[in-house]
Image: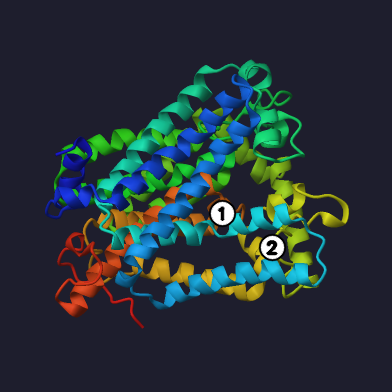
């Protein structure tokens, strides 16, 4: 038995699955993708900066897109007959269809938005559906849910250690002179308006606090954007909390203590990027987990820990103070972007089309080929990109996911910490999407949607066992256990 398998078995609270299932193509395929996501950017940076190969660096960043598409195609061809489509799945399909419609129709009506901006935006908007579908298909293909989630947390722990160490040990000159991250983002990642470290948010001025003139260094870890970095570690924090609660309920105190150590590492990795949206997402999700597991006292402990962090970490303290006092330029930028987005929606109630909003419509064109550049709010981004029907479809799909990941009867199917943790994290992400669209970034949000897809596969398999009684259909039924849950069929 592998090390990860031996760890995952007692954590899930169900019987061990056969080795053939753990080594299925779906399990291995997703494990490779989860590992590749945090290492692709450092590899591409090395190839670009020290190997001086721009095209090879770009090719490395495209590997994930091609690989994910091929993996989805393979799993769909082999296992789509094992899937049962529920009402929220049809909402997701409707959302995907509207992305295509809003990509083509504006062009037919004379839109000047460039093809590159449209394709890049469509790719971004489709990330949630694509990775969720991959997770569902992987479950149908016999993926070991527990093993994959433990693997994802292991990879995230390595990424968290890297993030914290680089942030703590590298001097400011590393970012300003040694590492040419600005040119990498502009040339390799294709964001042409990036000229300084301020443009990629590596430095932040926070309300006139210490070192205001030079700014605080924000951690990016194995990525290139601190906001995306912070949001990458939200899911591991919440999953850790859910696991600890379940381990305590099962009196596995040694397991809870071991996971708590990893939890501190994840919390540190969430703090150092100085992303207030990530902090809010963690806080909301942990509160929700505490309520589900009836650990209300933990909420007060969490508030006390947050107060300590506020006092002890200058960047955190000044970030919060600057937001409250209105002296933070980032907060004013958010307010300005929100006003611009609302006025654009009012002037264009049916939407403008894919490529008009967020970073791609703003930076991949100029003049009449540039989009409206609406950002800082995922829901306004969706309204502008795919119209009110597209936004409604996305919200209906999201509501369905939350309903069956959180609002289950009695308990979620084993491993319940995966189901409840992923649902709570999703709630946190969706709330903080009012401040940024982190759920639309492939590299830093793919793992989130994969885990959500895997968790939903567990829930739906358990539901089919409860209604059919024979376990036929979804191949992950062995992981569902015997806990009763609400049937998602409507």
Q: Is residue 291 visible?
A: no
Residue 121, given in percent of the width and then of the height, sits at 65, 56
Q: Earlier in the sequence, mark 1 or mark 2?
A: 2
Residue situated in front as seen by the camera: 161 or 361: 361
Q: Image height check: is 335 above or below 227? A: below
Residue at 28% in and 57% down:
293
Q: How is the image coloured?
A: rainbow
Q: Image height check: is 484 above or below 3? A: below
Residue situated in front as seen by the camera: 149 or 330: 149
Residue identifier under label 2:
354
Of discs 1 and 2, which sits in the foreground? 2
Residue situated in front as seen by the camera: 46 or 322: 46
Of the numbered discs in the image, which one, if any, rests on residue 440? 1
**In the shown orientation, is residue 65 left or right of residue 184?**
left
Residue situated in front as seen by the camera: 323 or 432: 432
Q: Is residue 236 visible?
A: yes
């Amino acid at each position: 038995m592998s090390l990860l398998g031996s760890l995952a078995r007692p954590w899930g609270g169900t019987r061990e699955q056969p080795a053939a299932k753990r080594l299925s193509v779906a399990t291995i395929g997703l494990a490779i993708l989860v590992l590749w996501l945090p290492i692709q950017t450092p590899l591409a940076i090395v190839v670009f900066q020290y190997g001086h190969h721009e095209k090879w660096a770009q090719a490395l960043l495209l590997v994930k897109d091609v690989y994910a598409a091929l993996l989805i195609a393979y799993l769909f061809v082999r296992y789509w007959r094992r899937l049962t489509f529920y009402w929220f799945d049809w909402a997701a399909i409707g959302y995907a269809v509207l992305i295509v419609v809003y990509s083509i129709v504006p062009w037919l009506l004379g839109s000047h938005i460039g093809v590159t901006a449209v394709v890049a935006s469509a790719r971004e908007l489709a990330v949630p559906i694509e990775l969720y579908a991959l997770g569902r298909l992987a479950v149908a293909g016999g993926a070991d849910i527990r093993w994959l989630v433990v693997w994802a947390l292991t990879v995230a722990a390595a990424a968290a250690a890297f993030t914290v160490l680089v942030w703590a040990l590298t001097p400011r000159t590393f970012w300003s002179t040694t590492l040419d991250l600005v040119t990498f983002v502009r040339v390799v990642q294709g964001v042409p308006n990036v000229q300084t470290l301020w443009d990629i948010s590596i430095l932040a001025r926070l309300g006139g606090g210490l070192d205001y003139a030079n700014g605080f260094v924000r951690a990016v870890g194995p990525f290139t954007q601190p906001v995306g970095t912070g949001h990458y570690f939200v899911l591991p924090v919440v999953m850790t909390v859910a696991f600890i609660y379940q381990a305590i309920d099962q009196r596995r105190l040694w397991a809870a203590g071991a996971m708590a150590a990893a939890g501190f590492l994840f919390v540190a990795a969430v703090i150092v990027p100085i992303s207030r949206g990530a902090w809010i997402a963690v806080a909301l999700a942990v509160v929700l987990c505490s309520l589900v597991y009836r650990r209300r006292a933990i909420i007060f402990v969490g508030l006390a820990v947050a107060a300590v962090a506020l006092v002890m970490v200058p960047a955190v303290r000044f970030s919060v103070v600057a937001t409250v006092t209105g002296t933070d330029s980032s907060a004013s930028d958010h307010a300005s972007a929100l006003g611009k987005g609302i006025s654009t929606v009012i002037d264009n109630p049916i939407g403008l089309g894919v490529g008009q909003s967020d970073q791609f419509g703003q930076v991949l064109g100029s003049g009449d080929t540039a989009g409206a550049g609406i950002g800082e709010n995922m829901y306004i981004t969706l309204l502008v990109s795919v119209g009110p029907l597209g936004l409604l479809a996305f919200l209906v799909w999201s509501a369905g996911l939350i309903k069956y990941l959180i609002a289950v009867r009695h308990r979620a199917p084993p491993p319940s910490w995966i189901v409840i943790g992923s649902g709570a994290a999703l709630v946190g992400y969706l709330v903080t999407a009012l401040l940024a669209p982190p759920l639309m970034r492939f590299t830093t949000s793919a793992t989130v949607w994969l885990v959500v897809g895997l968790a939903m596969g567990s829930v739906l398999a358990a539901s089919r066992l409860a209604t059919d009684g024979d376990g036929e259909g979804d191949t992950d039924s062995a992981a569902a256990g015997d806990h009763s849950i609400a049937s998602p069929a409507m």
